[in-house]
Amino acid sequence: MKKNILKSSVENASLNILLQIAIRCLTFVINAFVLRHVSQNEIGITNVRLLLLESTILFLSREAFRRACLTDTLHHNWLKVINLIWLSVPICAVICTVCGYIWLRLLSQPDVSVTVYYEFGVWSILISCIIELCCEQLYIVSQAFLFVKLQVVLEIINIVVRTLVYTSMVLYSDGQNAVLAFSFAQLASVIAYTVSFYIYFWYYTKQKNKDFPFKTMWEFFPNFSGKKWSECVDFPLFLLLWSFLKQGFMKQLLTDGERYVMTLFNTLQFDQQGVYDVVNNLGSLAARFLFKPVETSAYFYFSQLVQREVSIKKQIQQDSNRIKEAASVLECLLRVNSSIGLTVLSFGQAYAKLALFLYGGSALATGIGPVLLQLHCLAILFLAVNGITECYAAATMNVTELNKYNMEMVVLSVIFLFISLLFSTLLGAIGFILANCCNFIFRIFQCGQYILLEYKDTNYSPLKGLLPKKSFICCLILSITGTMYSEAIGYQQI
């Protein structure tokens, strides 16, 4: 089974990476075309204000359920787990109510000269989030039973529908009403994604597979009738879920802290937010199509291989090969991700201006855009390392350690928000990226300490994966020198 978990995790990550590369290449070309038709103000509204609303609701509503319910799936009582997962829908509805009121009544509204569809955009996000949570149990089951190709196909459907609807509406209106196009694209893609999930599992349950615990579609829906609470819900899993829920609020602040600051305190205008978001999206390509799929698969892998409530030393005594494999995979992931981050940092210094010119034209390649992208390449390095250390910690910490970690996250969140506000006030958009770098450094240090203590007095040192080889460093220095020289000559000729 261990080999199957590793094999499926690697297959899942590989397919997701290939999918993300293909889709990002497609959307890169389309976005480069759309950027020349949509105003920076509308980009700021859709990509910062509205997408922040979506990420806030979805992260707080479902992230804790995914992490808790994908822990030790071999021993799940799936009737209780399904009941637990469906609690995410009323939680989502409550969060939608609170966030919707804030976005519509408390935050500053865009001027009508920019768009008249802001309120419709907010409602489209609220409705789409509730719809998406209605298939969350299917997502978790597909993860637990390794439906790798299904997830890839559904992700393709989601992104293709979103891209086609948005692009066609923007081009049809000649760049006008981009917020309206975004709203319809959001609803259409989520409906297509959810319906496709249900159609697939309706078909799959008809096949009567013996190894699959669900025999009808009705078993994917909650069943609380005539039973005590303890018989309906897995209580130990609920306690783990509660720990992740508390952690989720703090992690969301750390993940999108700069967007909250620019949204709540208006430190940047909508057009400035648009430039920042375009640079951030371009700089985060590696994170989206490479780091995120690896982190998702790594979390599932470590959560199945390493027991939360048993110390590493005891697990070594019980099954040393399993812990040796986990430590080896962790070291390998750290080495690969840090190497990719260093490569992006070295090439990004020379080609930031050229990348922005090709992506969005001369308007993006002039001004502060290239400097933002160069600094963002540094943030990518820290992001690459933090993703692996944090996913290992979240997959292996016991409930007590998670609660302690949550308290540390509270302090870190307050510090991060203060630094973001201070740096952005003094340095503008540059301050947000520097604050993000500080955020990632603190989190890497925090999780690194946990990993060091876990493997203390053992023969394993997975954090060695963070140390690059001398030959690799020499290659990076040569590449920086060569690319900076070629950029100085080549860009002037464009």
Image (cartoon, rainbow, N blue to C red):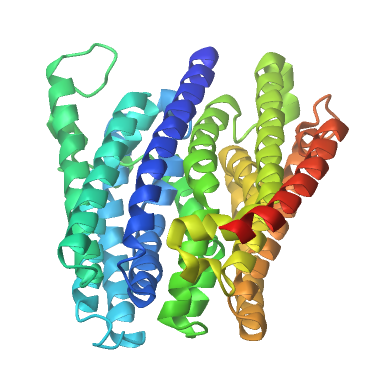
Q: Quadrant of residue 138?
A: top left
**Residue 140 in the figure: left or right of residue 476:** left
Spot occupied by residue 92 in the image (x, y as percentages of width and height): 29, 60
Point 32% across, 78% down: residue = 103
Reply above or below: 108 against 19.
below
Spot occupied by residue 240 in the image (x, y as percentages of width and height): 49, 46
Q: Nearer the viewer, residue 18 or 145?
A: 18
Q: Quadrant of residue 367?
A: bottom right
Q: Is residue 438 visible?
A: yes
Point 24% across, 56% down: residue = 167
Reply above or below: 327 against 269.
above
Spot occupied by residue 245 in the image (x, y as percentages of width and height): 46, 56
Q: Nearer the viewer, residue 305 or 355?
A: 355
Residue sitting at the far front: 493
Spot occupied by residue 296 in the image (x, y as percentages of width and height): 49, 38
Point 70% across, 41% down: residue = 338
Rendered-image quadrant of the C terminus: bottom right
**Residue 294 in the figure: left or right of residue 327:** left
Q: Nearer the viewer, residue 174 or 432?
A: 174
Q: Is residue 311 visible?
A: no
